[in-house]
Amino acid sequence: STNWEDVSDAISMAQDLDVIIVPSGKSTWNEGIIINKPLTISGDSSGATIIHKKTAGHIFVFNGSHNSSARLSNFTLDGENIAQGVNFEDFKNAFRIG
């Protein structure tokens, strides 16, 4: 599902270079997710996977000191002018959006 717990669990269980597909749907998250490994995280189809965050902070945080590459695609991220979409910390390598 698109809920925070399911996406967070999928990221935690993923191995380096895995592809995580988040199904179409809409969820409201109260916190963001930190990604510390090279992954591809993709919504099921363009614009149909919507993450809405009502609290301050980022929806996805990619920690580059642990990543060799990462990709994020097919999401609509809505922060209601409070939350930010994506943050890249210490990212010196390849990152692709789209």
Image: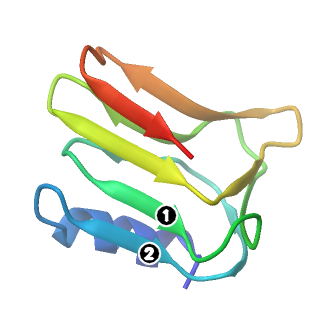
- Horizontally, residue 50 falls left or right of residue 81, namely left
Residue found 88% across the figure and 32% down from its top: 81
Colour style of the rendered protein structure: rainbow
Percent x, y for residue 4?
A: 52, 68
Distance between mark 2 and mark 1 Cα atoms: 5 Å
Q: Amino acid at mark 1?
A: Ser
Percent x, y for residue 22?
A: 51, 75
Residue found 31% across the figure and 45% down from its top: 35
Residue indicated by mark 1: 42
Question: Are there few (<14), some (14-19), or many (20+) residues within 10 Å of tag 2?
Answer: some
- Horizontally, residue 28 falls left or right of residue 91, namely right
Q: Amino acid at mark 2?
A: Ile
- Residue 91 sits in which quadrant? top left
Percent x, y for residue 80?
A: 88, 42
SS at badge 2: strand
Name the foreground residue: 8 vs 62. 62
Residue indicated by mark 2: 21
SS at badge 1: strand
Residue found 57% across the figure and 82% down from its top: 23
Residue found 65% across the figure and 58% down from its top: 75
Percent x, y for residue 10?
A: 31, 73
Rendered view: 17 above or below 62: below
Q: How many marks?
A: 2
Question: Are there few (<14), some (14-19), or many (20+) residues within 10 Å of tag 1?
Answer: many
Earlier-in-chain disc, 2 versus 1: 2
